Image: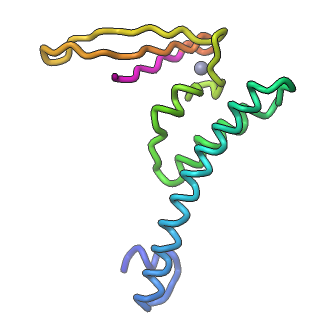
Amino acid sequence: MGACQAFGSGSNPGECIIIYDIMSKNKQLIKDKVHYLVDFAVSEFNSDKPNPYVYDYVKLSFKLAKTINYRVPKEIHRKVCKKCNSIRNIENTKIRTERRKVNGIYRKYIKINCLSCGNIKKIAI
Ligand SMILES: [Zn+2]
């Protein structure tokens, strides 16, 4: 009942279960929000009229993911840079494939280099 007391509820176990239900629902909701915000930022960035707040949307989505300890999937990291919150396009990225020997086995990576901040993201394939 330690977690229950943390939320300030009484000793009623039924109440505790309800709180856990709300928590799990909120987690899924926040995950959807993270994905939606990134997709929205990318679509706004690619539209004809530039939106100056696209970086704030990306920043907000990473902040939301942190609140529920959600590991942001690699699909999102392919679209945006984690360090400078910029949306990747042809001008500000360099993409190379790399082969590395790990424990005697060759593994393949996609190396994404952000040219605006210099951050390197490696994704295993
Ligand atoms: Zn960057």
Residue at horizontal 72%, vertical 32%?
43
Along the line of sight, the residue nearer the viewer: 91 or 114: 91
Q: Is 97 on the left-hand or right-hand side of 55?
A: left
Q: Quadrant of residue 47?
A: top right
From the viewer's perspective, tell me whether residue 98 is left or right of residue 56.
left
- Span highlighted in magenta in the image: 119-125
Q: Nearer the viewer, residue 8 or 107?
A: 107
Dominant secondary structure (helix, strand or loop) of the stretch shown in magenta: strand
Q: Is residue 20 above or below residue 33?
A: below
x and y percentages locating residue 87 in the rendered image: 65, 24
Residue 102: horizontal and vertical position, in percent?
20, 17
In the image, ligand 1 is in what quadrant? top right
Q: Residue at x 82, y 30 (%)?
A: 51
- Position in image of residue 100 (x %, y %): 26, 11
Residue 26, how many percent across, how many down?
A: 55, 63
Residue 29, relative to residue 84: is it above or below? below
